[in-house]
Image (cartoon, rainbow, N blue to C red):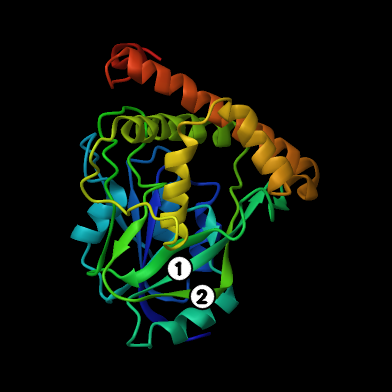
């Protein structure tokens, strides 16, 4: 058996029994694994314990911090390097071999990992989904997730999803991909993106109103990949017919049609997602920057 690599893995979880076993198998090279759970009602806790993971419960206060930042601040990590892996992600052996070498370089405090996203059993190589760089491996004392001032919006979940890590020090890029494949069905994809669209609507509103973001990555046209994306989003939020534009962007201009039927379905769903964001943005404006909380509690 390969020797353990001196890093700590952080896995945020809630009712992930369909994904968790495969995820935990893929991180068995790590010397320490934490599963930070949010009161799962399925077999997630039992599965995590069966793999020898440390299970910690997170109780969200509804505002801040969310799960990953709370874990980075409070867990007793044995190692200075932490690798954050979602339950629907896998770390293949060739990436582990690269990680073992990368963490020995004293010039870097973190590394971006490229995600290979699978949808309907197909790698979505186009449509803006690849490359998909995420800062997931870093010295935990040097990095925290940004705050995009979205705490007022309910039903967005207790975990950072689209926020990025702000890291002190130099950052590198690893060559081998991590894999992203959710073994749950389309129902769960839609349920998850329904929550995400709440969050996105608040981000759109903040951009339109110029609300100050207290601790976030800035927008720069000639910055890194994240900063460029933030700059383009500041332009995107003012464009008309965004659902149609999103479909054309994903399916035509970003070559999503090359991914076959899965690419077409993905483009249609992203167009629908954009429409949901627009409706919720309208609702936020109608209620003075707050979603109809009283109504949401009765759903």
Q: Which mark is residue 112?
A: 1
What percent of the width, then of the height, locates residue 213?
25, 43
The quarter holding residue 140 reads bottom left
- Residue 214: image location, x then y, percent: 20, 46
| Structural crowding at the residue carrying mark 2, measured as other residues with C-alpha within 10 Å and reported as few (<14), some (14–19) or many (≥20) | some
The Cα atoms of the two marked residues, 1 and 2, are separated by: 6 Å
Please give the label number shown on residue 174: 2
Q: Position of residue 45 (x, y in %)?
A: 39, 50
Q: Give left or right: position of 128 versus 80.
A: right
Left or right of 43? Residue 116 is: right
- 63 with respect to 23 (left or right): left
N-terminal-most mark, 1 or 2: 1
With respect to residue 59, does 6 lie above or below?
below
Does the rendering let one see residue 243? yes
Per the rendering, the mark at residue 7 is none
Q: Is residue 240 above or below residue 221?
A: above
Of residues 249 and 40, the one drawn nearer to the viewer in this rendering: 249
**Are discs 1 and 2 less than 8 Å apart at CB?**
yes
Between residue 229 and residue 277, name the one nearer to us.
229
- At a point 45% along the width and 34% down the height, the residue shown is 237
The image position of residue 194, as x and y in percent, is 48, 29
SS for tag 1? strand
Q: Compared with residue 232, is residue 134 higher up or lower down, i.e. above or below?
A: below
At x 69%, y 52%, the residue is 126
């Amino acid at each position: 058996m390969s020797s353990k690599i001196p890093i700590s893995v952080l896995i945020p979880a809630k009712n992930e029994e369909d994904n968790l076993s495969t995820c935990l198998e893929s991180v068995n090279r790590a010397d320490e694994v934490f599963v930070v759970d949010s009161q799962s009602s399925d077999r997630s806790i039992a599965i995590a314990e069966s793999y020898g993971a440390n299970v910690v419960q997170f109780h969200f206060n509804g505002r801040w911090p969310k799960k990953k930042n709370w874990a980075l601040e409070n867990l007793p990590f044995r190692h200075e390097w932490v690798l954050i892996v979602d339950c629907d992600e896998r770390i293949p052996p060739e990436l582990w071999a690269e990680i073992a070498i990368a963490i020995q370089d004293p010039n870097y405090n973190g590394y971006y990992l490229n995600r290979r996203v699978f949808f309907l059993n197909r790698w979505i190589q186009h449509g803006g989904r690849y490359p998909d760089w995420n800062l997931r491996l870093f010295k935990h004392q040097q990095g925290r997730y940004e705050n995009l001032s979205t705490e007022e919006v309910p039903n967005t979940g207790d975990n950072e999803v689209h926020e990025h890590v702000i890291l002190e020090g130099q950052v590198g890029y690893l060559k081998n991909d991590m894999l992203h494949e959710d073994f749950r069905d389309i129902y769960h994809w839609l349920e998850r993106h329904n929550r995400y669209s709440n969050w996105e609507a608040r981000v759109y509103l903040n951009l339109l109103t110029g609300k100050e973001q207290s601790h976030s990555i800035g927008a720069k046209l000639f910055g890194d990949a994240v900063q460029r994306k933030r700059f383009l989003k500041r332009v995107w939020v003012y464009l008309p017919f965004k659902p149609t534009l999103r479909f054309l962007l994903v399916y035509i201009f970003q070559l999503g049609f090359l991914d076959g039927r899965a690419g077409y379905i993905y483009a249609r769903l992203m167009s629908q997602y954009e429409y949901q964001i627009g409706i919720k943005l309208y609702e936020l404006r109608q209620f003075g920057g707050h979603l109809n909380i009283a109504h949401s509690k009765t759903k």
